[in-house]
């Protein structure tokens, strides 16, 4: 069953997709985009979770976490010039029970709009 | 003193017509830019930040980076990216940002003079583009790279 529209989801933003000035739209382009559900694991606990899993090689650093509401994500998809019915499907994994995916193919133009709508959380001190 | 070189010897073996490379026959071959020349190009077009980032992508991001599915930087995508930089003129003042996609492609993002987004993704067989001011997105083959650079310069 898809994740409810009231839920908020997050996506890790590492150095390969953020250079301190701009955010890469490829963060959301393509199919089966990985996200994580704040209803299952709170934001504060995502930092350690993402760092352990994603900071490979060590030069790749978790810089930000981008957050968006599922309902807002769907509205963006429907309002796009070529409307897409976006959904978020739960896909729990051993390392992250909150893991979910957006299965639909997201084009660069649509990804731009999603990236612009993200609420950006700064990494707490290590 | 004038030294006269002996006339070139005829090749013993001759390639059939359809196997001959025209450039070889003409004796003209474009010089492949050296690593140092490419570093200079990168530095001048993307600045120190872009130079350092690409260095990291080339040397530290091996297969399986990130969550285990990250692909290493594609040599063909990198080659096209360098060729594009030779022709590219970035309007708007700011240096473009360079990113690595999960598929091992290079993504280049900047804003035009009207502060609208221009984005390119260099893939092994094509270049994906997004031009916000023209509400245009799509792909072109590598051999259309010079034309794309010209088109982007004019916006």
Image: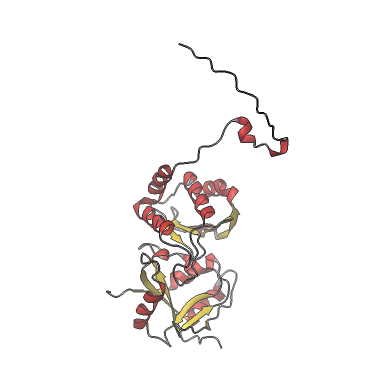
Q: How many marks?
A: 0
Q: Residue at x 45, y 80 (%)?
A: A36
The quadrant where residue A78 appears: bottom right
State how the image is colored: secondary structure
User: Is residue A46 in view?
Assistant: yes
The N terminus of chain B lies in quadrant: top left
Pinpoint residue A83: horizontal percent, then vertical percent. Answer: 59, 73
Give the vertical position of A123 relative to B49 (above or below): below
Residue that protrudes farthest toward the left in the picture: A125
User: Is residue B155 in view?
Assistant: no
Pinpoint residue A84: horizontal percent, then vertical percent. Answer: 59, 74
Q: Residue at x 51, y 37 (%)?
A: B31
Q: Residue at x 52, y 79 (%)?
A: A101
Pinpoint residue A34: horizontal percent, then vertical percent. Answer: 49, 76
Give the vertical position of B78 relative to B13 (above or below): below
Pinpoint residue A35: horizontal percent, then vertical percent. Answer: 47, 78
């Amino acid at each position: 069953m898809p994740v409810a529209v009231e839920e908020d989801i997050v996506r890790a933003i590492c150095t390969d997709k953020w250079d301190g000035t701009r955010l890469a739209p490829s963060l959301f382009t393509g199919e089966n985009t990985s996200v994580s559900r704040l209803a299952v694991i709170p934001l504060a606990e995502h930092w350690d979770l993402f760092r352990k899993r994603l900071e490979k090689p060590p030069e790749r650093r978790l810089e930000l976490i981008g957050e968006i509401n599922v309902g807002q994500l769907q509205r963006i998809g429907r309002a796009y010039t070529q409307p897409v019915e976006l959904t978020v499907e739960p896909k729990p994994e051993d390392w992250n029970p909150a893991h979910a995916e957006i299965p639909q193919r997201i084009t660069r133009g649509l990804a731009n709009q999603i990236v612009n709508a993200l609420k950006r959380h700064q990494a707490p001190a290590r | 003193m004038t030294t006269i070189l002996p006339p070139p010897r005829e090749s013993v073996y001759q390639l059939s017509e359809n196997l001959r490379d025209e450039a070889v026959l003409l004796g003209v071959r474009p010089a492949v830019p050296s690593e140092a020349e490419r570093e200079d190009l990168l530095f001048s077009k993307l600045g120190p930040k872009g130079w350092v980032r690409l260095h990291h992508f080339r040397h530290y991001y091996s297969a399986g980076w990130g969550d285990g599915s990250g692909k290493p930087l594609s040599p063909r995508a990198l080659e096209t990216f360098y060729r594009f930089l030779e022709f590219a003129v970035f309007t708007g003042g700011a240096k473009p940002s360079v990113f690595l996609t999960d598929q091992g492609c290079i993504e280049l993002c900047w804003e035009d003079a009207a502060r609208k987004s221009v984005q390119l993704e260099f893939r092994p067989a094509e270049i994906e583009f997004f031009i916000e001011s023209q509400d245009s997105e799509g792909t072109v083959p590598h051999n259309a790279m010079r034309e794309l650079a010209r088109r982007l310069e004019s916006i």
